[in-house]
Image (cartoon, rainbow, N blue to C red):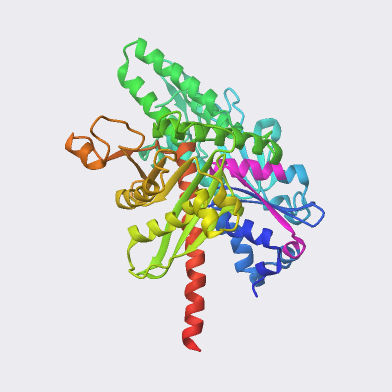
Amino acid sequence: MSFLETKSQQFQDKVRSAPKQPGCYIYKDSTGGVLYVGKAKNLRNRVNSYFNNYKKLELRIQQMLDQASDVELYVVDSEVESIILETNLIKKYKTKYNIFMRDDKSYSWVVFEKQIKGKNDFPRIKIIRNKDLIEEEKAEVFGPYPSQMPLRNILKRVRKVFPYASCNRRLIQITEEPLKVDTNNSIPCLYYHIGLCKGPCASLENKADYMKDFNSIKKFFKGEKVDILKDLESQMKTYSTDKDYEQAAQIRDKINDIKYVTANIGIDNEIDDISVEELKIKQREGGISDLVAQLKFPEDKLKVHKGFRIECYDISNIQGTNPVGAMTVMIDGEVRPDQYRKFRITMQETPNDFGMHQEMMERRLKSLDPEVVEKKKLKPDDSFMSKPDLIIIDGGKGQLHSVYLILKQYGFHTEIPIVGLAKREEEIFKMSSQFKTLENAEDEQSLRLQGISQFTRIMLPRKTEALFIVQRIRDESHRFGITFHRKLRSKKMVLETK
């Protein structure tokens, strides 16, 4: 028995179904007290690692896990958000096993030097591990942050958008026109040549322009992305009005870059585990609304409402052996493992991905047909009795069409919108004929004869909540199906060796 199996089933389910997104996790004891706070770039990998490597963990963490009765997971949208939230939560709960403030050298601070005229015209940004070395009257400090490497990675990415000087050279601006900077070395270093510094040492950038980028990075750590973009958009409009289109284009590119680097950052230093849930609920609501709008089904067939239910289906097998199907569920943008269902495929002609999808969907839809339920005396199933608002098939056009035929067979093709999600390009396909009423064009063949494509291709914008929602439930169906498949395969191998 693994260490994880000593915990409650609910605890095990939370760990195994943890999302692959960035976020924070909180281990709690039986009274609900917070034992430990951590962050992860991939929550599933991080949380599972505690139990996969339990015997190799330091004694302090083993003791914490022994006491843990629950784990709370908080999904965020970027590594930056996870760092900020983790810091906020450790400060809030003063957790015993984080050894917070008992060993400050284990933590890091981001230090923004203050601009001092004639002494420090081009202030630097540093990461410091020893707080005693920080002269706070000469700097603005952010932190403490439990991990240094993510901070370095974040600064590395942001520096590509907002270059700054990181050398120890003397940099004092003497004159503005012509620009003259006093320095002990006027030859630009490597960072200038790779675009990470604009070369104030060689009098190639004045202190006013330098401070614009410097302050933008500071706003970034404050979570003030909106203000950064407003400043840049204002600059772009000014250059455009002055017909300086080259500068306007550079600012436009910078806006696009900062949107990419800071995509979906909505957490600041005031957000905790309570407010982050409120924030994420709003984001999920926005994601569902955006997804519905992007899919462009008729409003009477697909509209946002409380309890919006998405079901996703996937097939798992290796060369047709031990094929299984998985149904995962998301309600109002949040995964619901208690509603997941698995199918052991019974058809003999495998591998046949289309046929296996059809078998799984037929078995699922039977529970929505009152006559079948009554005739076969099917047992009530909370998950099966709820009709989905949207069905997602993990697969391309072939899988989508095969499942659509089953919906048509049961008469649900006029009620339940269905789409397919192709893995390679994250393309979404829907049946062009679904919900269409055309004279003399009641089937797909007639539509094709009229030159109407059988499928409509939809590309959801990258790094949007709508795409995250689709990816999340697809990843869940894949994980859930693979887990069931491995279990069946292991049982078969045991039986064969006996």
Residue 66: quadrant of the picture = bottom right
Magenta-drawn stretch contains 85: yes
Query: Number of numbered discs present?
Result: 0
Residue 421 in the image, given as x and y percentages of width and height: 38, 47
Q: Residue at x 35, y 25 (%)?
A: 250
Relative to the observer, which residue lies in front, 93 or 286?
286
Magenta-drawn stretch contains 413: no
Indicate whether 181 appears above or below 96.
above
Indicate whether 241 appears above or below 29.
above
Q: Residue at x 45, y 35 (%)?
A: 291
- Bounds of the magenta segment: 64-89
Q: Which residue of the protein is positioned furthest toward the top in this rendering?
A: 241
Question: Is 410 positioned to the left or the right of 453 in the image?
Answer: right
Relative to the observer, which residue lies in front, 470 or 146?
470
Residue 433 in the image, given as x and y percentages of width and height: 30, 37
Indicate whether 305 appears above or below 148.
above
Residue 176: quadrant of the picture = top left
Q: Which residue of the protein is positioned furthest toward the bottom in this rendering?
A: 498
Relative to the observer, which residue lies in front, 196 or 466?
466
Residue 157 in the image, given as x and y percentages of width and height: 46, 41
